[in-house]
Image: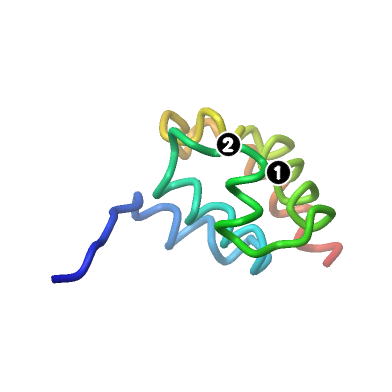
Amino acid sequence: MFNSFQVPNWYVDDLMPLLSEAEVKVLMFTAKHFNATTFVRLQKGTGLPPTILMAAIQMFSDANMPLTELAQVSPEDVNWQFLLERNKRI
């Protein structure tokens, strides 16, 4: 038997295309372990270097999606303008 977890459809359909690979790792790990997202656990779970992880954490905060509150964030809460503008620069 395989373990699994669910994520909101909008994570995959709307959000993931606007994220870097590192940010997707953080999003998925946090979605699975939403009650245990310490920096050390995020680093171990995603395999990201500290500087990349810090940048991803900051991006979620800038997009109005703080990782500590991710389970309560709805699509209406997200700063989509920030994400779209940021992607134009990348």
Identity of the residue drawn at 35% across and 49% down: 8
Judging from the image, the colouring scheme is rainbow
Percent across and percent down for residue 71 are: 42, 34
- Callout 2: 10 Å neighbours few (<14), some, many (20+)? many
Q: Is residue 74 left or right of residue 19?
A: left
Farthest residue toward the left? 1
Q: Looking at the image, which is closer to me, 32 or 84?
A: 32
Q: Looking at the image, which is closer to me, 3 or 79?
A: 3
Q: Is residue 68 left or right of residue 72?
A: right
Pick the quarter of the image with the C terminus: bottom right
Q: Which residue is mark 1?
A: 57
The numbered mark, 2 or 1, whose residue comes first in the sequence reads: 1
Relative vertical location of residue 11 with respect to residue 71 in this rendering, above or below: below
The answer to whether mark 2 and mark 1 are in CB contact below 8 A is yes
Q: Looking at the image, which is closer to me, 1 or 54?
A: 1
Q: Amino acid at mark 1?
A: Ile
Q: Looking at the image, which is closer to me, 35 or 79?
A: 35
Q: Could you tell me which secondary element the residue under label 2 belongs to?
A: helix
Q: Which residue is mark 2?
A: 67
Pick the quarter of the image with the N terminus: bottom left
Relative vertical location of residue 22 with respect to residue 60 in this rendering, above or below: below
Percent across and percent down for residue 73 are: 47, 32
Distance between mark 2 and mark 1 Cα atoms: 7 Å
Label drawn at residue 18 = none
Q: Could you tell me which secondary element the residue under label 1 belongs to?
A: helix
Relative vertical location of residue 24 with respect to residue 2 in this rendering, above or below: above
Q: Amino acid at mark 2?
A: Leu
Percent across and percent down for residue 15 are: 53, 56
Identity of the residue drawn at 80% across and 50% down: 55
